[in-house]
Image (cartoon, rainbow, N blue to C red):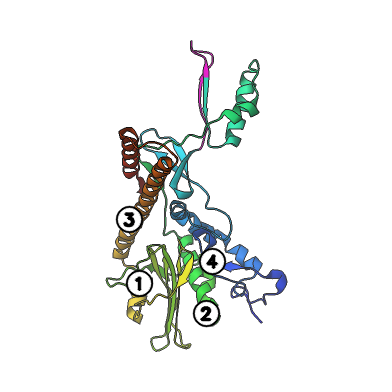
Amino acid sequence: MVKCYVCDNIIEKEILYKEHIILNAIGGKLTSNNLLCQECAKSLDKIDAALSKSLNFIGLLLDIDRDRGKNPPIKGKITDTGEEIHITSGGKPVPIKPIIEDCLTNSSKKYLYISAKNKKQMKETLNGIKRKYPVLNFDIEEILKLAVPNHKNIKSPVIIETTFGCDECFRAICKMAINFYIYKNGNHSFVKHLIPYIKDGYSSNCVWYYYPNHALSKTDKNFIHTLFVKGKPNEKILYAYIELYSSFKLIVLLSDSYDGKFIEESYSFDVISRDTFSRELNINLSRNELLNLAKNRPAEQIDNFKYSINNLLEEIDMMTLKQNIRKIIHSYFQMIAEGDSLNQESFMRLISELAEVITKRFFISE
C-alpha cells in the first residue's frame, strides 16, 4: 500500500492526487499518483505558487507548453513613459488599460480614438463612452466589426521585476527533491525530518546554489530541467541536484546521516521539445563539500547564480530574435510568391523591419 510521505496515511482512490514532480507552471510533465494525498498536496500549494511566480517570466518568454493552463501575464514598465503593461506568452507586450483619446468636446475636429488589448475590453470601453455621451447613437457591435488589429513595437526598454531565492522558493525546491527521491523508490524515513521545513518553514539550511568550476555534463540543449539524486552510505550523505531552465542550479541536502543503499538516479527534460533524454552528470560531492554548501551557503555561489541567469536571458533573447527574423523573412517571400513585385521599396521595408526587431530588448532588474 502506498502512503503519503507527509502524513503517512494510505493514499486511497478517493484522495489520490496527481503530483507534478517538476511544477506544471514551468512545463514539467513528470508526475506521480503515489507521493501525496489531496489534503497534503493542498497544504503545500503556497510554496509551489511562490516558485511558480518566481519562474513565470522565463516560461512566458519561452512560451512553454504546460499540461494544464497557460502562464499568467506579468507586469512590466515602459521606461520612457512609466506605463505599466502586461507581458504575455512569447514576450508580447499588451496594454493593461485601454488608451482613449477623447476629442469629442474640446476640439474643432471631433473624433474618438480607442486602443484596447482585445475585443472584450474594447466593448467595455465603448459601453462606458455610451454612458458618458448618451446623445451619441452608435451601434457597439458595428464598431467592433470595424476595429483593426494593430501590432505596435515598443521602442524603449521594458523593465520586469522578479525575485528568486526566497524561503518559500527554497522550500519548494526541497519538496521537488523529496518528490524525486521518493519517486525513485527512496525510503521516506531518510527525509522525514525535512517535512516540517517544507510545510511550515522551520529553519533548515539544506538548499543552496551550486555552480561548480567544472562542467556538469555535455549537451547542446539550452533549456533543460534536470533532477538528480545520490545517496552515499559510506559518507552518510543523501543529496539532490535541481537544475531548471539549464540555469537555476541548486543542491539539496536530504540527509547527513544516510545509511541506506547506494543510489544514483537522474531525469532530464527538454522544455522546448518536451522530450526526456539521457544525460550523464559529473556530480560526486564529498561530505565536507556538501555540508559546506548547504550549511555555510558560500556567497560566491550567488554571483555565479546571477551570471548564469544573465546567460539564460541572452539565450532567450537570441532564440526570440532568430524566430522573429525567420517570421519576417518568411512573410516577405510569401508576399512575393503571392504576386507582389520585388522592388527597392519592399526590400527597404524588409530591412527596416529586421533592424527594428534586432534592436528590441527586454531588461530584467535584479
The answer to which quarter of the image holds residue 142 is: top right
182 relative to 140, above or below: below
Q: Name the residue under label 1.
A: 293
Disc 3 and disc 2: Cα gap in Å? 33 Å
Q: Mark 3 points at which residue?
A: 310
Residue 122, percent from left and from top: 58, 32
Residue type (three-letter) at the residue carrying disc 1: Leu
What's the residue type where badge 2 is placed? Lys
CA gap, disc 4 to disc 1? 29 Å
Residue 6: tell me if it is visible. yes
- Badge 3 amino acid: Asn
- Say which of marks 4 and 1 sits in front: 4
Specify start and end residues of the magenta stretch as a single range: 96-111
Identify the residue at image location x=66%, y=76%.
9
Total numbered labels placed on residues in the image? 4
What amino acid is at disc 4? Lys
Residue at horizontal 51 percent and vertical 37 percent from the top:
96
Residue 326 picture location, percent across and down? 38, 49
Farthest residue, direction right: 14
Q: Position of residue 59 (x, y in %)?
A: 46, 55
Of the two numbered discs 3 and 4 on the same chain, state the one appearing first in sequence: 4
